[in-house]
Image (tube, grey):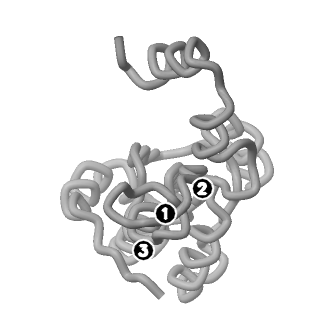
Amino acid sequence: MPTHVPVLRDRVLALLAPALGGPDAVAVDTTLGLGGHASALLAAHPELRLIGIDRDPEALRLAGERLAPFGSRVSLHRAVYDELPGVLAAAGATRVDGVLFDLGVSSLQLDEARRGFSYAQDAPLDMRMDPSAGLTAEQVVNTYAAGDLARVLREYGEER
């Protein structure tokens, strides 16, 4: 299992420590990935309950293995950000003390050629965070009209 150590782990721990030090603290890791931040938070705060969210089923599986030693203190959910209220309700969380959004692509996607995120490796162009959802990047690039591609890049890719 990959054991990626987040670059900003110590900074995240320091910033969230004041909010998570009390009894019955609840934290949400909205971009769980391989569970590096979640594992560090749970280890640093023995009473912490963590709700982990990721849209990538492979990330959830691997994070679940990594976080298994923390038992019932962890609740994992396959979801996206706008589903946060439903996830919190499903987890029985009536309040949250800290939330982490580690935005961007994770090493899990970049390091796995089959995921199709990296130009450095020869692989099909996929780029889906959830491999079961929607069109692949290859399908978009090869089937969208030039005007539609320009619109997508302008609206979503921060390109003029």
133 up-or-down from 157: above or below: below
Residue 96 picture quarter: top right
* Residue with the mark numbered 2: 54
Task: Please give left or right for residue 124 compared with residue 111 in the image.
Answer: right
* Residue with the mark numbered 1: 33
User: For residue 114, which numbered disc appears in the image?
Assistant: none
Label 2: which secondary element: strand
Residue depicted at x 40% and y 45%: 104
Q: Residues within 10 Å of mark 1 (few under 14, many from 20)?
A: many
* Residue with the mark numbered 3: 39
Determine contact: label 1, label 2, CB under 8 Å: yes
Task: Please give left or right for residue 51 compared with residue 104 in the image.
Answer: right
Q: At which x and y percent is residue 70? A: 54, 82
Q: Residues within 10 Å of mark 2 (few under 14, many from 20)?
A: many
Q: At which x and y percent is residue 143? A: 68, 32
Q: At which x and y percent is residue 131? A: 68, 58
Is tag 3's residue or tag 1's residue first in the polypeptide sequence? 1
Indicate the amino acid at tag 2. Asp
Q: Quadrant of the C terminus?
A: top left
Indicate the amino acid at tag 1. Gly
